[in-house]
Image: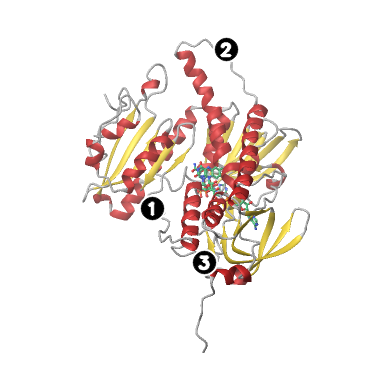
Amino acid sequence: MAPVVNPTETEISEKYDYDLIVVGGGSGGLAASKRAAALGAKVAVFDFVKPTPVGTTWGLGGTCVNVGCVPKKLMHQGALLRQHIHDAKIYGWKVGETETHVWEELVEKVQDYIGSQNFGFRVSLRDKGVKYINAYVTFVDQHTVKAVDKRGNVTFHTADKFIIAVGMRPNYPDIAGAKDYAITSDDIFSLPYPPGKTVVVGASYIALECGGFLNGLGFEVTVLVRSILLRGFDQECAERVGEYMKAEGVEFMRGFVPRKITQIEPGTPAKLKIEAKNNSTGEIAEIECNTVLFAIGRTACTESLNLESIGVKVNSKTSKVIVNEAEQSSVNNIYAIGDVIEGKLELTPVAVQAGQLLSQRLFGKGKVLMDYVNVPTTVFTPLEYGCCGYSEEDAHEKFGKDNIEVHHNLFQPLEWVIGQKAGVCYAKLVCKNDDNRVIGFHIIAPNAGEMTQGFALALRIGAKKEDFDSLVGIHPTNAEVFTVLDITKSSGKELVASGCGGGT
Ligand code: FAD
Ligand code: NDP
């Protein structure tokens, strides 16, 4: 038998068109392709957006920048400004008695910003020497892809290695009228007319964030909740987030799932009727509205990649690519990162870091694997909810209820002590009794994302409750509440919001 001789880098480059082809130009794909090119690899990235059922499409950059984090945060900010106008009056500012919001102006500004980002991505790929091809990719074999551009031109491209970073797209339920009359998060941020009264279906991240900013911008919002709010998150915190939204005017219909959507009158927005059924009581409800927004989960975009026929294993239930701890699929030259991989987190910074580390390992001397543990996240609901590590219920399940103590309290931001809501901001640390390590951090407050980012470092390096206690607070801030969390859940002591950040 002939000895196995590994080809040299020059031989690989001559054998294939590229050292690396990245399929998908979103958060993960762009990060991986730029890092690989910086390390000297010959790289191409293919990105193609299939229009939504109502025809929405967008440019290079993937979900986050076009139809995800970026427009969501801008619209969240737009909604918060209404609250700030209200607060300004309390602080003595004389502003008009009634404020009006022009949806089209916000959409235009948001889309202008996104357009500048799309352009910036193209420029940075060019500057880094990455070839960008706007075409839809399907695998032909382990080293070849077929690419079809928007005019239908077909080309074939080969590479030594591949990274699949195709992300996910929103689900539609199998009910009458779903694709004819409803939209998803893929459409809302560029909707050219005000959505009007909106029914949001679903109760996770995307549903509550979209419902939250639409309500804040002045639209009537009803959320159809199939079971619980924010599945996977600390349920006490999820309920507090929901209570705040309810107090802000969002209606929650618990236990209801949609059955059909009909159009009463066309228009922009149209007049629609959504019929929903309560799964436990059997009650049927008919809601008239202008927009139905589905946020009922997302499916990985692997369906037409032809992966199974080339040996790449995909979970048939989730359509996600199965990878090992080095993000390698069942075919050894094909890797996957970001939302498309099975069992990991669907977050932009995760996709970016995993992509950079993977390229570093493939084309540099990198050895570091992506660490998917203790990743912080924030739900940008009207009152933000940031967390890192275990929820209270997951900690009970993993370590046993007797080995867990929860330290918590309500607090009142100092900015809110004149005239605004009390008893809504909440801080919680989930700790292990045996070593007093903090394994769960939870905060419901304005700017929770900013606070969570820094404290996540403490969890990452194994901070204990006494480390939080000996930390000196910054006064007056909200974050200082974590230096004085002295009510344990086991004590059953009543929570009382102190004057500011919990510090005094
Ligand atoms: P994507 O960014 O989705 O990129 C995949 C790209 O591949 C897309 O451009 C797609 O069109 C393209 N593609 C697919 N198939 C093919 C093919 N066959 N050929 C060529 N191209 C193809 N995360 C956060 O961290 N913070 C947030 O606040 C946040 N908010 C979000 C809000 C919303 C409404 C949504 C939907 C998501 C949000 N996320 C947030 C999640 C975040 O957007 C994703 O985790 C991230 O974009 C995943 O990056 P990715 O590279 O895996 O995929
Ligand atoms: P999820 O899969 O997390 O949640 C789906 C929601 O829809 C659940 O509430 C679920 O209810 C409900 N649902 C599912 N099917 C139906 C149905 N047929 N009828 C009615 N309700 C239904 O999806 P999301 O789309 O909210 O989020 C996807 C991912 O995007 C998240 O995991 C997250 O990582 C990422 N993301 C991150 C954000 C951030 O960092 N701030 C913001 C937005 C998204 P049930 O609980 O009963 O199953």
Quarter of the rendering occupied by the C terminus: top left
* In this picture, residue 11 sits left or right of residue 465: right
**How was the colour assigned to the protein in this rendering?**
secondary structure
- Kindly indicate the quadrant of the structure image that contains residue 14: bottom right
Q: Residue at x 49, y 35 (%)?
A: 381
Disc sitting over residue 96 in the figure:
2
Mark 2 element type: loop
Quadrant of the image occupied by residue 289:
top right
Between 254 and 80, the residue placed more toward the observer is 80
Q: Nearer the viewer, residue 88 or 19?
A: 19
Q: Evaluate whether residue 38 shows in this view.
A: yes
Label 1 with label 2: CB-CB less than 8 Å: no
Q: Are marks 2 and 3 in contact (CB under 8 Å)?
A: no
* Disc 3 crowd, CA 10 A, few/some/many (<14, 14-19, 20+): many
Closest to the camera, between mark 2 and mark 3, is 3
Which residue carries the number 1 mark? 373
**Separation of marks 1 and 3 at Cα, in angstroms:** 21 Å
Task: Tell me the kind of residue under disc 1.
Answer: Val
Q: CA distance from mark 2 to mark 3?
A: 59 Å
Q: Amino acid at mark 3?
A: Ser
Marks 1 and 3, the one that precedes in the sequence: 3
Vertically, is 97 above or below 460?
above
Quarter of the image for residue 411 reads top left
Q: Position of residue 260 (x, y in %)?
A: 67, 45
- The residue beneath circle 3 is 329
- SS category of the residue bearing label 3: loop
Left or right, 414 with reference to 99: left
Q: Nearer the viewer, residue 235 or 227?
A: 235
What is the CA distance from the residue labelled 1 to the residue labelled 2?
A: 48 Å
Residue in the picture at 32% in, 50% down? 395
Left or right of 472 in this view: 161 = right
Q: Looking at the picture, how far across and down is residue 156, in whole percent?
A: 70, 65
